[in-house]
Image (spheres, rainbow, N blue to C red):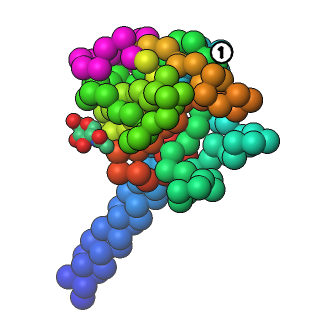
Amino acid sequence: MKVAIVLAVLVTTVLSTDQLFGHQEGPSHERSLVKFGPLCSGNPTNQKRGCDKNWGCGDYGAKRTHGPHKGLDIQCNDGATVYAPFDVKLNGKAAPYRSPTALQKLINDGVNLSGGGLCFKLFYVKPDKYRGSLRKGDRIGTLHPMQRVYPGMTSHTHVQMCDRSDPTKYF
Ligand SMILES: *[C@@H]1O[C@H](CO)[C@@H](O)[C@H](O)[C@H]1NC(C)=O
């Protein structure tokens, strides 16, 4: 009888401890989701590009002629300073176009970065360097002259995860 009571108490204690930890894990896990720091001068809140009259929309999955948009566009003026959104490692050049037109060559540039536990590319950026490391908020470079290539488009940097998944939750 005594053994049964001791066992019952033990089981109850273990169960409630599990529930306690289980309860704490959920929210703290969500809170730990990394967020991009500001990417561009003039856009401290990482405002996303909406839709342009002639050039489509900036959200992930937006319609494009060659399948859905595989990145998220963050507003960034031509010539704006582009900043490291985390402490990052620069992993080399990342160019958006495989066969750029003469005009597209003006902006066919970008950089592959890793930081915050993520691997991602920033397109249309002219980085000061393609290799090395930077601290969060350091200057990566500047935005190429997008208006010369796509007049009237909301100038932006295109954020694309290396695995082409949706980056929106990190903003
Ligand atoms: C970006 O750089 C990382 C690290 O060098 C590499 O593993 C990855 O394949 C590159 N991603 C793309 C899409 O180029």
Of all residues, the one furthest to the front in this rendering is 102
On-image quarter of the N terminus: bottom left
101 and 50: which is toward the camera: 101
* Location of residue 96 with respect to 137 vertically, above or below: below
Picture quadrant of ligand 1: top left
Horizontal and vertical percent position of residue 32: 43, 41
106 and 42: which is toward the camera: 106
Is 101 contained in the magenta span? no
Horizontal and vertical percent position of residue 31: 49, 43
Is 131 contained in the magenta span? yes
Does residue 116 appear in the picture of this structure? no
Does residue 72 appear in the picture of this structure? yes
* Location of residue 83 with respect to 98 vertically, above or below: above
Q: For residue 77, which quarter of the picture?
A: top right
Which residue is located at x 58 percent, y 37 percent? 73
Q: For residue 126, which quarter of the picture?
A: top left
1 and 66: which is toward the camera: 66
Q: Which residues are magenta?
A: 127-139
Which residue is located at x 31 percent, y 28 percent? 93
Horizontal and vertical percent position of residue 44: 62, 20
Which residue is located at x 36 percent, y 28 percent? 111
Q: Is residue 128 left or right of residue 144?
A: left
Tell me the residue that label 1 is attached to.
42
Q: Is residue 171 left or right of residue 135?
A: right
Q: Is residue 19 left or right of residue 9?
A: right
21 and 60: which is toward the camera: 60
Q: What's under tag 1, amino acid-wise?
A: Gly
Q: Residues within 10 Å of mark 1 (few under 14, many from 20)?
A: some
Q: For residue 137, which quarter of the picture?
A: top left
